[in-house]
Image (spheres, rainbow, N blue to C red):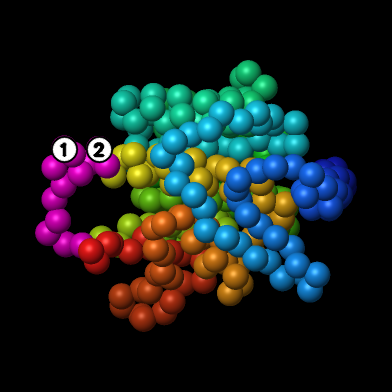
């Protein structure tokens, strides 16, 4: 089993190497990742995804699994999200990039079933939106099977799972900077949904195009900021301990 995984990992590394060499021949707007001669990474801010462009994407080199969970699994948002993902990337059922999974319906209420889906597919990246409780459990088992280094990125946006579990099993976690006492009306809720969808699409594209697994180093902030685009992010700081997280970030509230 481990030999098979090592062969798969070596194959992906070779593909990433060729992708970097020939990336100059492929015209893409995002993400603007540049590998300099000293192996440093330059990441430029992303443009807004409010106007989606139809591109041709395939899952030939691995699919991106998108889990839509609590807080975002109402019929209206799911329909809009899947339509947007299909328009932008295509769905795997039609040879496209994205495999959408809606919790609880598509997993029969069992988040543990996520592990089976991931293991049965050639996964290049995972994006979680509103990860439900215990999502970290199947992810932790997958991580253990790869000796702690799975060959794909896991991005988590606005999770409802255990914070420490999410930080352990995901490359990065993005959360809201909550402000007590604020209540949104219908128009604000619509804008928030649209902004969340734009963030989801940005994360999927970033996961699809990254030629390597993100390490939890000082450069991680710049990757997260690239995904967030015009939204400003900062590292999460635990209010009780004052400890700053390595891979947990919050989207800052606008001061304007």
Give the image location of residue 119, x and y in percent. 68, 37
Front-lying residue, 141 or 154: 154
Q: Secondary structure under badge 2?
A: helix
Q: Is residue 184 left or right of residue 142?
A: left
Residue 252 showing in the rendered view: yes
Q: Residues within 10 Å of mark 2 (few under 14, many from 20)?
A: few
Q: Residues within 10 Å of mark 1 (few under 14, many from 20)?
A: few
- Check residue 181 for magenta coloring: yes
Query: Which residue is denoted by mark 1 in the rendering?
Result: 186
Residue 152 vertical position relative to residue 109 in the rendered view, above or below: below
Q: Please indicate whether residue 142 sits to the left or right of residue 202 in the image.
A: right
Position in image of residue 183 (x %, y %): 13, 50
Magenta range is: 179-191
**116 lies above or below 158:** above
In the rendering, which numbered label is found on residue 190?
Answer: 2
Give x and y (percent) for residue 20: 79, 53
Residue 36 locus on image (x, y percent):
75, 67
Q: Secondary structure at mark 1?
A: helix
């Amino acid at each position: 089993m481990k030999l098979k995984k090592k062969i798969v990992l070596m194959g992906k590394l070779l593909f990433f190497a060729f992708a970097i060499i020939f990336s100059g021949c492929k015209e893409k707007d995002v993400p603007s990742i540049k590998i300099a001669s000293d192996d440093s990474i330059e990441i430029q801010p992303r443009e807004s995804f409010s106007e989606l462009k139809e591109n041709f994407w395939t899952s030939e080199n691995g699919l991106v699994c998108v889990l839509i969970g609590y807080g975002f699994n109402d019929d209206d948002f799911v329909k809009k999200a899947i339509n947007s993902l299909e328009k932008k990337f295509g769905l795997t059922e039609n040879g496209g990039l994205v495999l959408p999974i809606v919790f609880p319906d598509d997993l029969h209420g069992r988040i543990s079933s996520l592990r089976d889906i991931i293991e049965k597919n050639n996964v290049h990246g995972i994006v979680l939106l509103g990860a439900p409780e215990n999502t970290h459990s199947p992810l932790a088992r997958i991580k253990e099977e790869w000796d702690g280094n799975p060959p794909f990125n896991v991005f988590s946006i606005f999770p409802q799972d255990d914070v420490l579990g999410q930080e352990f099993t995901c490359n990065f976690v993005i959360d809201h900077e909550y402000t007590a006492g604020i209540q949104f009306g219908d128009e604000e809720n619509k804008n928030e949904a649209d902004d969340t969808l734009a963030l989801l699409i940005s994360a999927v594209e970033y996961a699809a195009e990254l030629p390597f697994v993100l390490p939890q180093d000082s450069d991680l902030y710049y990757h997260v900021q690239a995904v967030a685009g015009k939204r400003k992010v900062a590292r999460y700081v635990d209010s009780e301990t004052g400890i700053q997280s390595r891979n947990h970030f919050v989207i800052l509230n606008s001061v304007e």
